[in-house]
Each structure stands twice: as structure tokens, then as C-alpha cells.
Image (spheres, grey):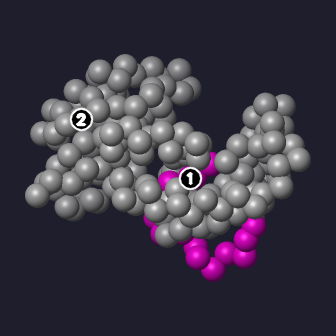
């Protein structure tokens, strides 16, 4: 039996680190993963495998990416069904959008379990991000752009620094591409 995974990679084509998607796909294919495809240039890779040990698979992918690219690439694996459930929750519906042009709705993916006892919402150090909902390993965050960007952060006990973020609307496209 094979399983489809969506790999959400951190640090691909940001901060001056340019990676062509063809190279990224070849790293994944070189691991024996099947039906490898990528979606946009921000590090979203889909593949099929019989491997069910997700931590081991993640470690293998991260080691191969480090060897190929020369730097650490934190990798977060989700199945299409998991991504569908993440999107179905849609906690942003009730957020007042008076400054909609300056708002971005995001999902932050982590490998660690998040603190389910947090009293929400939680604001970032500069009040430019607000954590509004949590799943076990995903945080739903509203970015309030100040000068076109966000620069605050959450304490590590709220949101582990090893994470990657995707815009909510982009996740819908990633899911469609992964299952289409």
C-alpha cells in the first residue's frame, strides 16, 4: 500500500537561497519516493511511498536535502486528508476584516505538539501576529502587516521556532494540486 504525503519545506527560495524545483524533485526521487511533484517555488512537494514511519521519513528527507543543498531544511509532512481537515476548521471566518488589506491568514506547521492549554488569542511580541486557534501540530495565525511586513514572534512555549508557515488560501491550492 502506498501513501501520499505533502512535504512543506522551510527556507526554500527565501533569504537568497534559490532552489530550482527540478533539483528539489530529483532529491525526493533519489530517495525512491514515487510520483514526485512540486507546487510553486516555496517548497511544497508531493510524493507517494509505502513508508509509514513519518519521523524516520522526515529525518531521511531532511538529511538528503541538507546533503544536496548544504543547509538544514526543516520538513513537515502531512497527508492530503490531514490538510483537508486543517482547512475545514477555517477559524478565520469570524475575524473582523476592517483592515483586510493588511491582514494575512496563515497556518504554522510544527513537528512538536502545541500547548492546547493556551488561552487564545495570543499576540506576538510586537502585536503584529495573533494566534487564534490550534490543532495538535498546527497554529492558525493572523498576520497584521505593519509597513508591509511582520516582525514579532511568539515565545517558544507558544510556538516552537522550528516551523513553517503557509497562507491559508495557498494551502487550498496545495491540497488541490496534491490530489489532482
85 to the left or right of 27: right
Above or below, 23 against 103 in this view is: above
Residue 134 figure quarter: bottom right
Query: Where residue 3 sits: x, y (%)?
Result: 21, 54
Name the mark on residue 36.
2
Residue 65: in sight, yes or no? yes
* Residue at the (38%, 38%) spot, across then down: 177
Disc 1 secondary structure class: strand
The residue identified by callout 1 is 108
127 to the left or right of 84: right
Residue 112 lies in magenta, yes or no?
yes
Q: Which one is nearer the viewer's eye here, 163 or 102?
A: 102
- Residue lying farthest to the right in this orientation: 98
Identify the magenta region: 106-121
* Residue at the (67%, 48%) spot, across then down: 105
Query: Where residue 119 sits: x, y (%)?
Result: 72, 76
Query: Where residue 102 sits: x, y (%)?
Result: 81, 38
Amino acid at each position: 500500500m502506498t501513501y501520499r504525503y505533502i512535504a512543506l519545506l522551510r527556507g526554500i527560495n527565501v533569504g537568497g537561497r534559490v532552489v530550482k524545483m527540478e533539483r528539489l524533485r530529483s532529491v525526493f526521487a533519489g530517495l525512491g519516493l514515487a510520483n514526485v511533484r512540486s507546487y510553486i517555488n516555496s517548497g511544497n512537494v508531493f510524493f507517494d511511498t509505502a513508508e509509514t514511519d513519518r519521523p524516520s521519513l522526515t529525518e531521511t528527507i531532511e538529511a538528503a536535502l541538507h546533503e544536496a543543498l548544504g543547509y538544514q531544511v526543516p520538513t513537515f509532512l502531512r497527508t492530503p486528508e490531514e490538510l483537508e481537515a486543517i482547512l475545514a476548521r477555517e477559524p478565520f471566518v469570524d475575524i473582523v476584516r476592517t483592515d483586510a488589506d493588511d491582514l494575512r491568514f496563515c497556518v504554522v506547521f510544527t513537528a512538536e505538539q502545541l500547548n492546547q492549554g493556551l488561552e487564545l488569542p495570543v499576540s506576538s511580541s510586537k502585536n503584529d501576529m495573533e494566534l487564534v486557534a490550534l490543532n495538535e501540530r498546527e497554529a492558525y495565525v493572523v498576520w497584521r502587516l505593519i509597513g508591509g511586513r511582520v516582525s514579532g514572534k511568539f515565545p517558544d512555549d507558544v510556538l516552537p521556532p522550528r516551523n513553517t508557515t503557509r497562507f491559508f488560501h495557498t494551502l487550498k491550492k496545495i491540497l488541490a494540486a496534491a490530489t489532482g
